Image (cartoon, grey):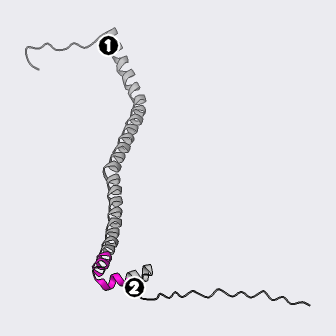
Amino acid sequence: MPEGKPRPKPASGKAASSRAANAKANSKAEPSRAPRSRGRHSTLVLLLLGLALVAVLFAFVYPTRTYLHQRRELNAAERQLAVLRGTTKSLQHDSEKLQTDAEVERRAREDYGLVRPGETPYVLVPAPPTTTPPTTSVP
């Protein structure tokens, strides 16, 4: 022991007995707190794990869902674009054909029933449907 410090004296009397009683009370009180403390600790751990799971869902699942939804929309838009390009090509072809006099005349005759001066138009009218009366047998 260092030379300059006095040695602690052993406790005697009332003070010693009260310290001993406090030490016993503390040792008895701590085990009773331990299960409660463990319960709170496990609840806190479960809560933090739940929050971590929610964070993972927001960080990965929601963007993945959004990405897949956008891919479906993109595929649908590409299909529609292909159809529109085909329609555009067909309309351009028809437009080029309509630049000739022969095509204009053909369409005028077929679609509108126009004729040249001096021509006699003939229209074929379908025959009216024939109906036969139902046959009934008389006994």
Residues at discs 1 and 2 in contact (Cβ within 8 Å) = no
Q: Is residue 51 inside the magenta stretch?
A: no
Residue 79 at x, y = what percent? 34, 70
Q: Residue at point 77% right, 86% down?
A: 133
Q: Nearer the viewer, residue 40 or 53?
A: 53
Badge 1 density bin: few <14, some 14–19, many ≥20, Cα 10 Å:
few
Task: Find disc 2 in the rendering and name its residue.
Answer: 117
Q: Residue furthest right?
A: 139
Q: Secondary structure at mark 1?
A: helix
> In what quadrant of the picture does the C terminus appear?
bottom right
The quadrant of the image that shows the N terminus is: top left
Quick check: 128 above or below 56?
below
Q: Position of residue 57 (x, y in %)?
A: 35, 50
Residue 41: quarter of image: top left
Q: Which residue, as the protein is rendered here, is positioned at the far top?
A: 14
Residue 89, percent across and down? 29, 76
Q: Looking at the image, which residue is at 19% across and 14% down? A: 8
**Where is 17 relative to 50, above or below?**
above
Q: Which residues are magenta?
A: 89-106
Which is more toward the observer, 116 or 61?
116
Mark in front: 1 vs 2: 2
Residue flagged by tag 1: what amino acid is it?
Ala
What residue is pinned by disc 1?
16
Residue drawn at x 34%, y 74% as measured from the top left: 87
Q: Residue at x 37, y 85 (%)?
A: 106
In this picture, residue 88 sits left or right of residue 42? left
> What predominant SS class does the magenta segment belong to?
helix
Label 2 crowd (10 A; few <14 / some 14-19 / many >=20):
few
The three-letter code of the residue at mark 2 reads Pro
Task: Let me know if residue 92 is in the magenta part.
Answer: yes
Q: Label 1 vs label 2: CA separation?
A: 138 Å
